[in-house]
Image: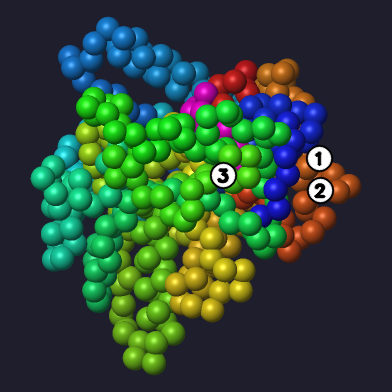
Amino acid sequence: MSLVKQQGILSPDTRNEKDADVIMTAAIVGWAWSRLTNADVNKRHARVDFELKDTQKLNAKELVEQTETIDIHRAAITKLNQLLHATGLKPEQQVELGTTPIWTTGGRISGGSGDKTPADAYRYNPPLPDGYAAKLFQMATNPATAGLLGYQGRGAYTGFIDGRTDGQTGLMSTFQHTVPFDDAYGRRWHPPEAPPDKTWGMILTTAMQDHEDPDESKQGLKQWGMHFEGPAPQRNRDICAYTHGMIQAIYDVHVHQLANDTSPTKKTPYNPGTPYEIAVGKQTTKLASCFPCSIFMEATGHAASSTHLGRGESWSPLYPPSNPTTTQHKAWQACNTQWQAYCKSIIDAGLQCLKKAPAQVNGDWTASVAALDLYLNGPRGVNKTPATAAQAYANLILDAVTVHDHEVKRVARTLK
């Protein structure tokens, strides 16, 4: 990456929080627009889900927090639909707001069922895995063995594959790495100074990466099973990144598909498997994909069964070498190229909506809307270099999610 240190993501003169709000709002608006105007009428629906917990099991503070969650989701989706209608969609073309499926042990998110209607039972409740996949599923969902398999803390979504014609890949947990320094990966943003207690993008503080505590809720990420890839990240130099289990599972499906397609003993028919994500551990019950995961899934042909607008903190793809030679790295690159192109299409669509209906944008965010337009389409905008433009769009989303916050709050702040 080429590292740019400045106050705003989009320019030295903007504020990174508002830039992040506008970038993600544009992406969410564009995602909704692209689904609601899909050429395939059967895919012409868009839905955002949030988690509702049993009120009988919540204390007074948790009840207030849940009420606030309901209110902000209703407000954000109302604003989102008002913008879409102000820019040309018909009243019946609107984003639906729903709730995630009720969590049960081993609840799953499906990669590929998101194009089914919300009324389709198989969208949220696919058949249980079979064969060796069933054994892995049982290991991941059994408290006696789950802790041996990887990360179990907040956001512990574990990827796995079901239905592959030949063989079975193991379970894949979210892990931390750093964005590699290579100009081939494009421009990335970093504030002038990282927070004093952490590397930029890091979840929790440096002290909480590895911290033993008798109180389980106060333990560090390592104690919850997080894997840290590569050398320890350096403050003011590195950007921490996290690749979720579902994304690893999607890469794995495409690796096996490519391996079969290029094999001299190619199997026909061949099923590379369906990617799933299991909610594991005690702290992970939301059966929906974060927005960054969802758009990667959509781009690669595995639309998410459910999408939430919570946090996608420092979400990241994997980075193959700039000139991949192995089947694995070629498949990663192909997925990344699809994802980058999709990021460009939805940000372009969302930005056009924001420009077309400026009265729907809160005044304090208009400078960042203008800065986004200039960054993309100005005299020195990234679209002046078509070969790398899509990558630049995707990197804006990656930069935005290093400014940690709920996506639903970004939409609620940006729109009025």
Tell me where residue 12 appears, x and y as whole percent.
79, 33
Judging by the rendered image, the residue that carries numbered circle 1 is 374
Q: Earlier in the sequence, mark 3 or mark 1?
A: 3
Mark 3 or mark 2, earlier in chain: 3
**Element marked by disc 1:** helix
**183 sits left or right of 42 in the view:** right
Residue drawn at point x = 35 percent, y = 87 percent? 266
The residue wearing badge 3 is 234
Residue at (37, 66) in percent of width and height: 253
Q: Is residue 91 above or below residue 373?
A: above
Give the mark, 1 or 2, whose residue is nearer the N terminus. 1
Q: Label 2, on which residue?
A: 381
The outermost residue toward the top is: 60
Q: Nearer the viewer, mark 3 or mark 2?
A: 3
Q: Is residue 2 above or below residue 291?
A: below
Q: Does 141 appear above or below 353?
A: below
Asked whether disc 1 touches disc 2, contact meaning CB atoms under 8 Å apart, the reply is yes
Quadrant in which the N terminus appears: bottom right
Residue 78 included in the magenta stretch of the image: no
Magenta span includes 402: yes
Q: Going 68% across and 19% down the picture, which residue do you hit? A: 362
Neighbor class of circle 3 (other Cα within 10 Å; few <14, some 14-19, many 20+) is: some
Query: Where in the figure is residue 96, as x and y percent of width and height?
Result: 43, 31
**Taking 142 as reference, is 164 left or right?**
right
